[in-house]
Image (spheres, rainbow, N blue to C red):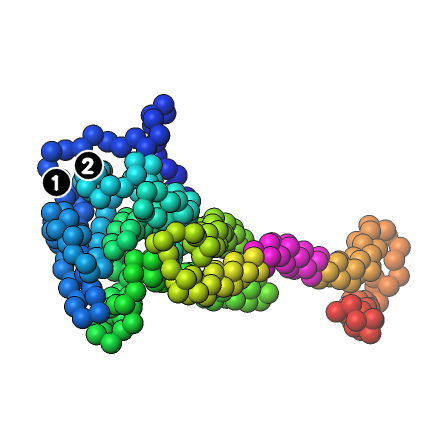
Amino acid sequence: MVHSIKLPIRAVGLSPGYIPPEEDEPLNHNISISIIEYSETDYLEKDQVSIKQCLDRLDTPSMTWIIVNGVSDTATVAYLGKQFKIHPLALEDIMNTGQRAKLDTYDNQVFIISRFLFHNEQTNTLSDEQVSIVFGPNYLICFLERDKDVFAPIKVRLRKPSSRFRKQGSDYLAYAILDVIVDCYLIVIERVDFDLDHLEEELVRSPKPQTLQKIRHAKRQMISLRKNIWPMRDVINRFQHLESNLVTANTQVYLRDVYDHTIQTIDMIEGFRDVVSGMVDVYLSNINIRMNEIMKVLTIVSTIFVPLTFITGIYGMNFDYMPELHYHWAYFTVLSLMALIAAGMVYSFYRRKWI
């Protein structure tokens, strides 16, 4: 089954940008914060840090990347939003996961929502999670739904002293995050392609009632993929052409490559949708062909037994005067005649290529 579609949960009648009341002290329930600080010469990485430590690092000239794992503790997230001056509308979208991918700009901040896709091998389901990004002049805050090491490739690059990554700003880090997310789309697409190939083989060789359920499952996967990936095209396109002092021309050049990968992924999804749509027709055609083959065999058998039934019907009549009944070899003669008729009909069908 496909991971169920998540909808934003929001009570009716609340004002725009409503967030739950803050607590005096953040509790950090079901939430963890990591911080990465880097420059051309220095690199610092810490896990399980406090909000105060994050605020202290924002005053440094180095680039600061804050990763918040878990958004279920709304009070703590609201406190974070207040300290980092995140707009209430953006903060509401961060806490209400299930948002559509989008890009918004606020006072000296850029807010991006993207959808991260992955395939759960244990349950054989396609799952999606929301990744929220807020970045300013020398910082980037990334909100994840759960503690998942999504950005390990970026961390590996940052740990290298010779990496040119360290010379870039927050816009380049945002590009790198989106690039990893889009690359994960391609991994998911490859898995879907593999599954569709096996489904096509099963559909052609021996379709079963369970095959139709698999086709429905694949169709829902295509809907989920399109729902999550299609809006990313608009996000990256807008990011690429964003007129802001937070986005450099150098980053915009790299965003073109991510945009191309997104378009490639969308094209593959559209192709898969056509394939899945055609699978239903192929399934019905195969069922009809099998039914026709069965009816063909039954018709041939019935046709062969028609003259044999006619002969046995004649000798089943209770007439007193039937001379051949008293013939010594009559029984074997009639059986031989019936066998010759059946063999002749089978040969005739074979010559006509009916069997």
Q: Splitting the image into 4 quarters, where does residue 91 fall?
A: top left
**Residue at position x 14%, y 33% in the image:** 23
Residue that numbered label 2 is attached to: 75
Residue closer to the observer: 214 or 327: 214
Position of the C terminus, as image quadrant, is bottom right
Q: Secondary structure at mark 2?
A: helix
Residue closer to the observer: 23 or 313: 23
Q: Position of residue 54 (x, y in %)?
A: 15, 51
Question: Furthest-bottom residue in view?
Answer: 162
- Magenta stretch, main secondary structure class: helix
Residue 27: numbered disc: 1
Whether pointer 2 and pointer 1 mark residues with C-beta atoms closer than 8 Å, the reply is yes
Q: Splitting the image into 4 quarters, where does residue 94 fall?
A: top left
Q: Amino acid at mark 2?
A: Ala
**Horizontal arrangement in the rendering, residue 258 relative to residue 91 (left or right):** right
**Residue at position x 35%, y 30% in the image:** 16
Q: Which residues are magenta?
A: 273-295
Q: For the residues marked 2 and 1, what is the alpha-carbon distance in whole angstroms?
A: 8 Å
Q: Amino acid at mark 1?
A: Leu
Number of on-image labels: 2
